[in-house]
Image (cartoon, rainbow, N blue to C red):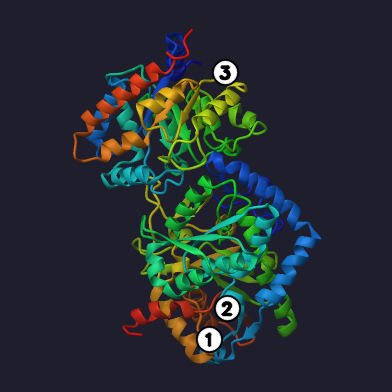
Amino acid sequence: MNKPAEPNSFRTGPDEQGMFGIFGGRFVAETLMPLILDLEKHWDEAKNDPAFRAELQELSTFYAGRPSKLYFAEGLTRHLGGAKIYFKREDLNHTGSHKINNCLGQILLAKRMGKTRIIAETGAGQHGVASATVTARFGLPCVVYMGATDVERQKPNVFRMKLLGAEVKAVSAGHGTLKDAMNEALRDWVTNVHDTYYLIGTAAGPHPYPELVRDFQSVIGSEARAQILEQEGRLPDVIVAAVGGGSNAIGLFHAFLDDRSVQIVGIEAGGRGLEGVEHCASMNAGKPGVLHGNRTYLLQNDDGQIIDGHSISAGLDYPGVGPEHSWLRDTGRVDYLPILDDEALEAFQLTTRVEGIIPALESAHAIAHAIKLAPTMGKDQVMIVNLSGRGDKDVHTVAKMLGMEI
Amino acid sequence: MSTRIDRRFDKLKAEGRPALVTYFMGGDPDYDTSVAVMKTLARSGSDVIELGMPFSDPMADGPAIQAAALRSLKAGQTLKKTLQMARDFRRDDDETPIVLMGYYNPIYIYGVERFLADAVEAGIDGLIVVDLPPEMDAELCLPALKAGVNFIRLATPTTDDKRLPKVLENTSGFVYYVSMTGITGSALSNTTEVSAAVTRIKSHTDLPVCVGFGVKTAEQARVIGASADGVVVGTAIVNVVADTSADPVEAVAALVGELADGVRASRLAVAP
């Protein structure tokens, strides 16, 4: 693959067709096209409307609890004996992850468009919980599609969604993971297009979703950039985030893309290793293709059939990635590296012990990279890791992996 | 440039009846049975054949076609083999139009130029690619038209008069009107609304308009065929192939025979 020409700025995409280089686009059935164009129109108006921004700001502050703290992880830093590690504490948001940032933005858009029913897909259940939360808050019915495998491994989140009044529909097609949930959500949308808003949880799907989800999540990086300048008086040397669909990662990265001194690292789920098919490292082991409305790196066979991946983390268990990440990979601005299940599990335990913070397994992938990298860096160097969510939901999975009964 | 599709619709227009368009999944349940099903479709009265290209993630399809795609892929079907089916079919039949129907990714991975060259050589006349709206015409639609392959677009209840010209702009062969907002295999919607939609589309184009999604019986084919230039039946055929209690080829022949009688009866009531 030819490396695209380096742009003057990495922060101007997508173009009017919704493309980031060759990635992105609007690969959807005709039934959805008019709605997607309508969404784009409303989004263009909303993002320039001071009243919309003010309402989102108010909810972010008083409902979600923003800004989230940038926390100096002294215990982990001392344990590793290298670069200073900061955690961006998205786990402290209402609902326990970064997902609420996007859900608040999109529920306001849905209201603006006059939609009366919300559907969502979820992998780990974090987006499902955030969707169920905002629909409870705004009094709209919500259906969450979730792979049957994920329903099993994320039981606490399934119960939370039900308590919040959402209907959780288990999808047994494929491996019963995020990809299958997204297929089923798209089928619902195409059927109920007149009254239904599809609240996509990650920075993927047809244009304008990758752009609008990124914009709602980029508050993470904007805050972190200002906070590190305040707390350290300088920009970080490295920033790290886990990438499934990639919304927490693009949210952290976007504000730093034109700070060329900052090394940016996205962590893919390496699962049980990249040799076979038991991983979800689409940018390390996949190739560009078209799925779920956009062109992006995908795990697929030689016939263009999508391969079900594997990750210990339900939130990273997706054979694709948001299109902007694919473009950032090809331009070389961001490095994407795999972390194995076992490495993530170790990071999960270490962070819990030395910081008293139980991270989500997704976030533990990013921390695992920090654990490898920090000791190779100087003590005067600074790293930010996106702690995208809290790990309470994962305790059953971790107990099982460690051979414990709870 | 006239294609087999154009010639077939001209002939049916002269006969004064709508086309029976049948969809089946290539490679389901296995390659040889599927080729036999394809030949049976043409012999039993199908005027146009839609040859389904299986995809792992068919987002616009209901459970029946999803399951058919998985059976086909499990039996080893690939895009290369689907093209080979067309070649096998063409040995006995050089007149019945073949339209490939499916999703873009397998074509994209095969390579658009190579795919079009192989499709033309295999005797393919048209393409229906569900996830390529007019906004993405540069991907496959324009290269296909250049290669002499019809690009058949879906129009839907959400395609309003303002958008219709854009949808029709690079469409050729025929227009496929999706009778409902939904996935394949759902229940047929109000037939009065469907015929109003067909009339609306025909006011924008001279192309034949075929109606699909939800048509399962000869009676439905007759009713829809009264206003449309063609009736598409898919899920009902896929279901017959999936039913292992009977020989799939015989069962398909019986169903398609009934459907063919249905479309032949559809204009009788309105004849002067």
Residue A222 in view, yes or no: yes
Residue that numbered label 3 is attached to:
B206
A65 sits left or right of B14 in the view:
right
Q: Quadrant of residue B197?
A: top right
Which chain is mark 1 on? A
Residue A131: x and y in percent read 57, 65
Which chain is mark 3 on? B
Q: Circle 3 sits in a helix, a strand or a loop, which is it? A: loop
**How far separated are the C-alphas under marks 3 and 1?**
67 Å
Residue A340: x and y in percent read 41, 72
* Amino acid type, residue under disc 1 in the picture: Ile
Q: How many marks on residues?
A: 3
Residue A16: x and y in percent read 68, 46
* Amino acid type, residue under disc 3 in the picture: Asp
A76 sits left or right of B215 in the view:
right
Residue at x 47% of width, y 28% of height = B211
Residue that numbered label 2 is attached to:
A91
Label 1 with label 2: CB-CB less than 8 Å: yes
Of residues B132 and A105, which is closer to you in this image? A105
Q: Are marks 3 and 2 on the same chain?
A: no
Of residues A165 and A292, which is closer to you in this image? A165
Local packing at callout 2 (Cα closer than 10 Å; few below 14, some 14-19, many 20+) is: many
* Amino acid type, residue under disc 2 in the picture: Asp
